[in-house]
Amino acid sequence: MQYLLMIYSAQNAGPQPGDEDFAEFMGEYFAFTRETQDRQAFVAGDALEDVDTATTVRVREGKVDITDGPFAETKEVLGGYYLLECQNLDEAIEWACKIPSARFGSVEIRPIMTLPAE
């Protein structure tokens, strides 16, 4: 079963580009990604551009409303994701605990819904 692990944190939480420990932090992410690939759990994953680049689209009664920025004003923002193949939720939780940003943010786990073919 596939699970989406969405990585949330406050924008300035954890090591930032230019910080002394940022390279080590990114190395942890590269190692995590390699481990998911080596164990054949990796399906997809990427970091997202800064929340300031977000665009939100709403359609209400046929009218399109486009807003710069994220859908909701929150302290923590979605910064990236992993889509992993896991045996069960317990395995997805094990992976989520290894994501470096889990130490100062949160990782939301959602199973991917399998829809019947038409």
Image: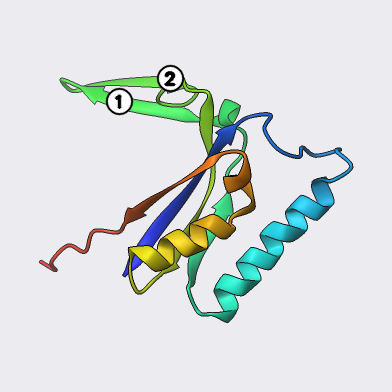
Identify which amino acid the numbered label 1 is placed on: Arg
Q: What is the basis of the colouring in this image?
A: rainbow
**Local crowd size for mark 1, using a 10 Å CA cut-off: few (<14), some (14–19), many (≥20):** few
The residue at 50%/63% (across/down) is: 95
The residue at 57%/47% (across/down) is: 102
Left/right of residue 5 with respect to residue 99 in the rendered view: left
Distance from disc 1 to disc 2, alpha carbons, whole Å, reads 8 Å
Identify which amino acid the numbered label 2 is placed on: Thr
Kindly indicate whether the residue at mark 2 contacts the one at mark 1 (C-beta within 8 angstroms): yes
Residue found at the very far right of the displayed protein: 20
Q: Position of residue 59 (x, y in %)?
A: 25, 25
Left/right of residue 20 with respect to residue 51 in the rendered view: right
Residue occupied by mark 2: 67
* Label disc, if present, on residue 13 of the rendered structure: none
Q: Position of residue 78 (x, y in %)?
A: 51, 38
**Local crowd size for mark 2, using a 10 Å CA cut-off: few (<14), some (14–19), many (≥20):** few
- Residue 5 versus residue 19 in the image, above or below: below
Could you say which quadrant of the image residue 10 lies in? top right
Sequence-first tag of 1 and 2: 1
Left/right of residue 19 with respect to residue 2 in the rendered view: right
Residue occupied by mark 1: 58
The residue at 57%/54% (across/down) is: 46
Q: Secondary structure at mark 2?
A: strand
Q: Position of residue 25 (x, y in %)?
A: 75, 51
Q: Position of residue 24 (x, y in %)?
A: 81, 54
Q: Quadrant of the C terminus?
A: bottom left
**Between 69 and 4, the one nearer to me in the picture:** 4
